[in-house]
Image (cartoon, rainbow, N blue to C red):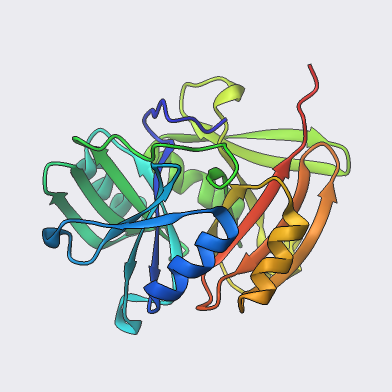
Amino acid sequence: MLTTRYITGAPNWLDLGTPDLDGAISFYGALFGWEFQPGPPEAGGYGFFRLDGRTAAGGMRTTGEQGPPSWTVYFQTPDADATAKAAEQAHGKVLMPPMDVMEEGRMAVLADKAGVPFGIWQPGRTKGLDVVQEPGSLCWVELYTADLPMAAFFYHAALGLETYGVDFPGGSYTTILPGGQSEDAMFGGVVPLADDPLEAAAGAHWLPYFEVTDPDAVVAKARELGGTVSLPATDIPGVGRVARLADPAGARFAVIKTAPQEV
């Protein structure tokens, strides 16, 4: 389970790069109740999506040269430089070398062996997101990849992550969790692209999930605001009601109303 008690290897930050930041502020504000707080002048236009006064994500305006509109998931590391080196040794790439973000922390943007971008965050003054799991906030991440064993090897080598198979009504699923932790620490999953034709066309990528109280209403609102829907709200037994979307600029994300857990 994703929590704000961040440990090495767990997702601890999330941000949006988009050419239309004003449009994103309006879109996600209507979907999740977020308000945007610009960062200080030295942040270069970076700001924070806030949910009831708590940081739920970051965001900034980007250009085509910086890549397509997308959400980037960041994982906690105690040493960004060492993690970047480990990623290179595991045949990944360093897209943005480690750099200090004022006194807030140290970050880098990397890519796995399949070319999927992700970030790493070495906490300083900012430990991570202020809110997860609640409606309107990050609750899960999924990696869609053509080669699950290769991905498992890479993320274990770079971040110490481990995989764990889970059976649920309707099939099995490969979860990911920080190394050395119990199953309760699982925060996401790995999905072979061959098993999901809807995502295969998009290629390998990380997909963030946001908890919501009414996926159907979110889908309807997203369409009204110019977003697109790749998977309408759908019940997955034992998991919840899920929908996959993209904002008007094309950044992909998913929403879920998590099924109550049996005691």
From this viewpoint, which residue is outermost toward the bottom?
Answer: 64
Residue placed at 25% from the left, 33% from the top?
78
Observer able to see residue 231: yes
Q: Is residue 82 above or below residue 243?
A: above
Q: Would you say 70 lies left or right of 190 here?
A: left
Observer able to see residue 201: no
Tell me where residue 140 appears, x and y as whole percent.
58, 43
Residue 61: which quarter of the image? bottom left
Residue placed at 52% from the left, 45% from the top?
138
Of the pair 167 and 214, the residue shown nearer to us: 214
Tell me where residue 179 appears, x and y as whole percent.
46, 28
Location of the C terminus (image quadrant): top right
Tell me where residue 21 appears, x and y as whole percent.
38, 72
Residue placed at 80% from the left, 22% from the top?
262
Residue placed at 51% from the left, 70% from the top?
251
Q: Is residue 162 above or below residue 121?
A: above
Q: Would you say 201 lies left or right of 167 here?
A: left
